[in-house]
Image: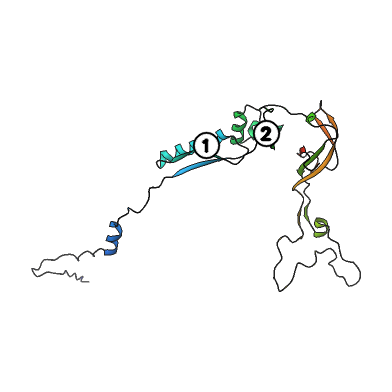
Amino acid sequence: MSVHMHANKTTSNGAGHSPEPPQPNLYQKERFTMNMSNIPDLKCGIISVSRDCFIISLSENRRQAIVSAYEKKYGNLYEVKKTVENDGYEAVQLGFGDVKVQRVNKPMMGHFKKNDVAPKKTLKEFKLDDISSVNVGDTLKADIFAVGEKVDVIGTSKGKGTAGAIKRWNFSRLKESHGTGPVARHAGSLGACSDPSRVYKGKKLAGHLGCERVTIQNLDVAKIDADNNLIAIKGAIPGPKGGIVVIRNAKKA
């Protein structure tokens, strides 16, 4: 049999009571009652940027949609009635190659519908001094160039995977005579050992070769076939067979 004892505090008149609650910290009182008049009025705002490949109205519609969704959930949001442009030049966009509608994302589909043109697989921008003679939906053919004209051809070179320093940077190899060792095709010295005790940035070493943007300048236009929309160019054309290239007027002709 166990006995449980319970004792209560008593006052002078013998009445029991619970312990007094702890007193609040004076620092907490001052912290919650301090004057907050030094905080300035702030406005939460949004501003949109129109990229080169999108039209201004598309950027404005997206900005308005974000503002409406924010105001429904959180409150007022100040919409900047200005679109920041990063152009300052005149240019046209050329599309090449048909593509299925199912393979075009929504932003680009809206871009094509806004201009009432069919979707294209490749879209490139060209700067022009005057675009007044070009209209949306115009078709450009090969006869815009002339035989004998100098042009630059831009394309993506063939990817060759990982290559050594000799193939990638045209390094020379060592003699394969007695005593050379199995280092005939190595890159050689990478730098000093004690100072700076590291390899400098940009050191030519083995690595990925090809699959990069290449520009071949001052090539000659050999023949123009306007009926079949073909251009014959004399010289090296970067990229594999069936690759997409850009032909422009030569800048250093």
Mark 2 is surrounded, within 10 Å at the Cα level, by few (under 14), some (14 to 19) or many (20 or more) other residues, namely some
Residue 191 in the image: state x and y as whole percent.
75, 68
Residue furthest bottom in the image: 194
Which residue position is annotated with label 2? 92
34 or 173, nearer to the observer: 34
Which residue position is annotated with label 1? 62
Left or right, 110 with reference to 188: left
Q: Nearer the viewer, mark 1 or mark 2?
A: 2
Left or right, 16 with reference to 236: left
Secondary structure category for the residue under label 1: helix
Secondary structure category for the residue under label 2: strand
Q: Quadrant of residue 217?
A: top right
**Residue 112 visible here:** yes
Disc 2 residue type?
A: Val
Mark 1 is surrounded, within 10 Å at the Cα level, by few (under 14), some (14 to 19) or many (20 or more) other residues, namely few
Point out the tag, 1 or 2, that comes first from the N-terminus.
Answer: 1
How far apart are the two marked residues, 1 and 2, measured between alpha carbons? 23 Å
Label at residue 32? none
Query: Residue placed at 83% from the left, 59% from the top?
Result: 166
Quadrant of the drawing holding the N terminus: bottom left
**Residue 1 visible here:** no
Query: Residue placed at 69% from the left, 33% from the top?
Result: 95
Query: Residue placed at 79% from the left, 30% from the top?
Result: 142
Marks 1,2: beta carbons within 8 A: no
Left or right, 246 with reference to 185: left
Above or below 29: residue 10: below
